Amino acid sequence: MTAEFMFITFTLLLAGIIAVPLASRFGLGSVLGYLIAGIVIGPVLHGAGVDVVALQHFTEFGVVMMLFLIGLEMQPKVLWAMRSKIFVMGGLQVGLTTLAVMAVAMLFGQAWTIALAIGLIFALSSTAIVTQTLNEKGLMRSDGGQASFAVLLFQDIAVIPMLALIPLLALKELGDALHAGDDHGGGHGDSVLNLNLVEGLPGWQTALITMAAIALVVLAGRYLTGPIFRYIARPRLRELFVSTALMMVVGIALLMTMVGLSPALGTFLAGVVMANSEYRHELESDIAPFKGIFLGVFFITVGASIDFALLGQNLALVIGLTLGLILLKCSLMLVIGRIFRLPGGDKWLFGLGLAQAGEFGFVLVSFTVANAVVPSPVADLLLLIIALSMLLTPALFILYDKLIAPRYSRQQERAADEIAVGSGIIIAGHGRFGGIVNRALRAADYDPTVVDYSNDQLTMLRRFGLSAYFGDATRPDLLHAAGIETARILVIAIDNKAAATELARYMHEHHPHVHVIARAVDRWHVYDLWSAGCRDIIRETYDSSLRAARSAFEALGHPREKAERLVGVFEAFDRRTMLKTAEAFIRSEDPHADDSEYSRLIRESLDTWEAELKASMRDMLKPQQD
């Protein structure tokens, strides 16, 4: 058993390590890399007698962790502001998709009960693939990304009534056959641990227990997180923090499962409650690596679960139904996006992103078979359609990136010709960084032109009478419409590192007269921006870190003036060394290689630089010591 476990683990990890870097290198994304890896090793796992479906259910815990981390990033007030999108847009999507798929299934001769069950299954989309891809591409904060996330959240909520409704659709003849199979099963049911707290209870008691479980999660997240982490912090053992974080997520998921709720929904709620906790970042850093591993293995199992023998026997039917499902769901999403006035590009992101079936569909298919709702032969085809639709999803995102987004950006740029050119200052991105720059300039009677990709953000700005325009500031025509030819300053404050670097490179090549101020996420991003030709780079946390260092010197007893001079010495030294390392980074073909100029410079100069900085600091401190 130990050897089997190690073989499975080694095979899954090896497949991911090989496939994902190759897929990323060709611009396919990590999700498609994992899926392809699963397809390749599928025969190996099946040949070794591995229960891929059971493994898949286990690795679905990655989805639970992902939603917990998303919840940690969301303030309750943000979630409350999304309530109309979650319940109205999400409810409309689930309702319309269920009815449309049900109608198609009935046209194929299925009974209305089976057709309804199929509609419920296909109404769900893949939270794992969509959320992971949106985050990778920096699209989660766009209007299309926010709408997609709202609908996915409602789908997780909708799983609860679906699980209650499906048993009511049971067919008598299927039930008789199922019970007959159970009679010959050997009677092992007594050995199964049953942790369902609401099984067999009246509806009102189930509702009370469910509400009590939700209240327990909210109260525990609000009042117990701090004391628990303060207690386990005493031994100062890192593994205790990791174990506690995992224990909390597993415990919440278990509680939600015991009362018949979606574990992913429960952990998301817990994450939202803990979003203001002082231990939020500790939880994120502890759980994120496990989330990535579980999600990667889950995607591999999706690829490995494809039954190619059954697919070969029903090739035309399965491919036709899969493409038909994607087309149907995408069409409905586009209609809903139009109703909610999503901009053109975001509407297509919303439609294509949610066009697949979801991982919870695997659970519902098994549930329908166990409750005598859907016959096994039909269920086997449904599993194939779900897996193939998920496999095609990364290709849909590539279609959006390569064809649809550029097209709508060009349309958007033509519409943006009416942008009123202000004081020659353009701010690309109005989040927590660009917003402060905008406020400071306006306070000095300048009139920056703000361009942002979030329609909701710009609606808020316009409500207060501020000049703001929707659009992708990385597109040349939109920059032209914003007056880049006569602009004096461009502030690049967008979140996407790659997009910010490309915009800086474009400005250096085509508009060198414009002074570009670029926000850098970290030191590596500084190097990328420097290599792109940008020379006014602001690390987003650098100045606040220097202020924290100054406060630390003051707390150690140094006067404010001396603390500022000490920080000034460090800052001047850091800027000098940053210039040297940036130039070496640019000249190195592979900066991370051991024999690169950049690596050699760091190795050869680190001790010297450190000694130089310490000597400068000691000179500053001598008068006080004397």
Image (spheres, helix red, strand yellow):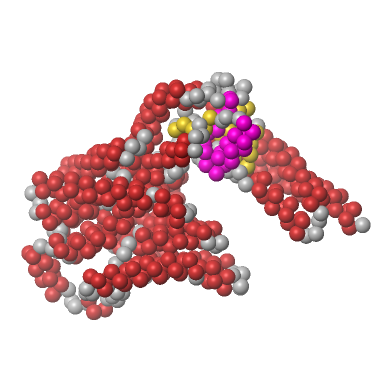
Q: Is residue 225 magenta?
A: no
Q: Is residue 22 visible?
A: no
Extreme-top residue of the structure: 485
Q: Is residue 434 magenta?
A: yes
Is residue 285 or residue 566 the one in the foreground? 566
Report the number of numbered marks: 0
Q: Would you identify the image quadrant in which residue 69 lies?
A: bottom left
Q: Would you identify the image quadrant in which residue 330 lies?
A: top left
Q: Would you say 596 lies left or right of 362 here?
A: right
Against 295, residue 133 (above or below) is: above
Position of the C terminus, as image quadrant, is: bottom right
Q: Residue 199, image x and y in percent?
A: 24, 73
Q: Would you say 107 lies left or right of 41 here?
A: left
Q: Please tell me which residue is depicted at 18% across the width and 56% down the height of the picture.
A: 117
Q: Would you say 501 lies left or right of 89 here?
A: right
Extreme-right residue of the structure: 626
Q: Residue 355, image x and y in percent?
A: 28, 43
Is residue 618 or residue 412 the one in the foreground? 412
Q: Residue 585, image x and y in percent?
A: 64, 37
Q: Please tell me which residue is depicted at 61% across the width and 25% down the height of the picture.
A: 488
Is residue 116 or residue 578 the one in the foreground? 116
Position of the N terminus, as image quadrant, is: bottom left
Q: Please tell me which residue is depicted at 53% across the width and 61% down the height of the picture.
A: 277
Q: Residue 144, image x and y in percent?
A: 38, 41
Magenta-highlighted residues? 423-445
Q: Please tell me which residue is depicted at 45% across the width and 61% down the height of the picture.
A: 273
Q: Is residue 94 visible?
A: yes
Q: Would you identify the image quadrant in which residue 442 lies?
A: top right
